[in-house]
Image (cartoon, rainbow, N blue to C red):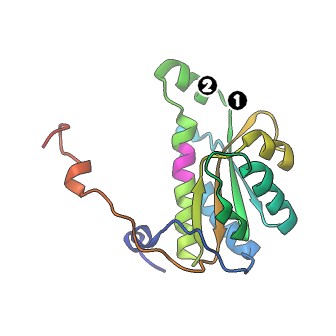
Amino acid sequence: MENLDTLIAKRRRIREYLDRPVEKELIARMFEAARLAPSACNAQPWRFVAVTDKELRQQLIGEGLGGVVVPNTWAKTAPAVIVVCSDTDFFTHRMGEKVQGVQYHLIDLGIAMEHLVLKATELGLGTCYIGWFNGKAIHKLLHIPSSWKVECLITLGYPAKTPDATPRKPLDEVSFFNTYSR
């Protein structure tokens, strides 16, 4: 097993996948990693739907990604798509937004999704987040309850190729000690 630093450095956005299904057992291990993520008030406001059926997946991509300004046509090559949903009715999240102006469930989802993506990386799988999609179409297609919101899609599969690391800002540009200054 690789250490966390290695996994973080190794993770890439993958947009070309092999034509090879992802084993259900591996997806279950990814879901378990996401399930163990911390959340505000231990609300665990997430649900993950793995779409692996080829016809349903193509329909999801066609209806869920069709019509967006930037079409993610490469997503058609992914043998699986993870649909990430949040509980919009949970009291703490509604109050957090009203009182603090913070959507805590989105913080929680971000942590859980990164757990899932890092586990995928450890398992030799590639992923790519998709944040621009037709949530209503996906809701209807996958029979998602009305109190749940589709927040993100994650394509998943065995990488056909792995891109080089994308440039990152230097550490001293993005981090400070004690005050926001140099």
Residue at x-position 72% and y-position 75%: 22
Q: Is residue 124 above or below residue 67?
A: below
Describe the element under mark 1 as helix, strand or loop. Answer: loop
List the single residue furthest toward the left.
182
The three-letter code of the residue at mark 1 reads Asp
Residue 105: percent from the left, percent from the top?
A: 58, 38
Residue at x-position 47% and y-position 74%: 163
* Residue 30 part of the magenta-drawn span: no
For residue 180, say whether it is visible: yes
62 sits to left or right of 2: right
177 sits to left or right of 161: left
Describe the element under mark 2 as helix, strand or loop. Answer: helix
Residue 4: percent from the left, percent from the top?
A: 41, 69
The three-letter code of the residue at mark 2 reads Arg
**Between 67 and 21, the one nearer to me in the picture:** 67
For residue 37, say whether it is visible: no
Quadrant where the C terminus sits is top left
Q: Quadrant of residue 156?
A: bottom right
Q: Which mark is residue 94?
A: 2
Going from N to C along the chain, the mark reached first, 2 or 1, is 1
55 sits to left or right of 81: right
Q: Quadrant of residue 129?
A: bottom right
Residue at x-position 80% and y-position 43%: 137
The answer to whether the residues at label 2 and label 1 have Cβ atoms under 8 Å apart is yes
Residue 169: percent from the left, percent from the top?
A: 28, 56
The residue pinned by badge 1 equals 89
Q: Which residues are magenta?
A: 108-112
